[in-house]
Amino acid sequence: MATRESIDNLMQQCEDALRYAEDQYKQSSLQEHYNDDDYTKALQQLEETYQDIAKMAHSANSQQREQLHRMRLQLQQIQNSMILESH
């Protein structure tokens, strides 16, 4: 079973990834040319965090899985927005 500490650490990782991605997304919408490297890095960080959530969900209890699911939806939402923005 996933420990509370491991879930808390992952939630912090998610929050950090979301914050970084949102910053990059906002910057790209304000500028015609955005920093491709940081934008790509933000997308990669979102994907890695998404994968970490999927791994953690296997050992989580039902309450933890629900928390992870909600976070996964937030990650997907910003990830989708960023992918659409970049095309």
Image (tube, rainbow, N blue to C red):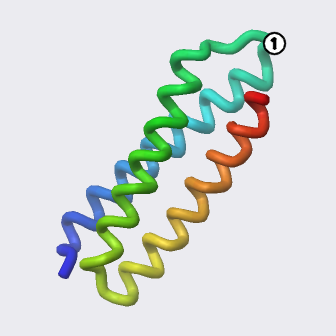
Pick whichever, 1 or 22, lies toward us: 1
Tell me where residue 30 sits by quadrant. Answer: top right
Quadrant housing the N terminus: bottom left
- Label 1 belongs to which residue? 32
Where residue 4 sits: x, y (%)?
Answer: 22, 73
Residue drawn at x 38%, y 89% is 62
Q: Amino acid at mark 1?
A: Glu
Residue drawn at x 62%, y 37% is 22
Residue drawn at x 21%, y 75% is 2
Where residue 46 sits: x, y (%)?
Answer: 49, 44
Q: Is residue 60 found left or right of 39 in the rendered image?
A: left
Secondary structure beneath label 1: loop
Callout 1 environment at 10 Å: few (<14), some (14 to 19), or many (20+)?
few
Where residue 81 sits: x, y (%)?
Answer: 73, 44
* Residue placed furthest toward the front: 87
Pick whichever, 71 or 45, lies toward us: 45
Residue drawn at x 78%, y 33% is 85
Q: How many marks?
A: 1
Quadrant housing the C terminus: top right
Image vertical order of residue 6 relative to residue 58, above or below: above
Q: Is residue 40 found left or right of 86 in the rendered image?
A: left
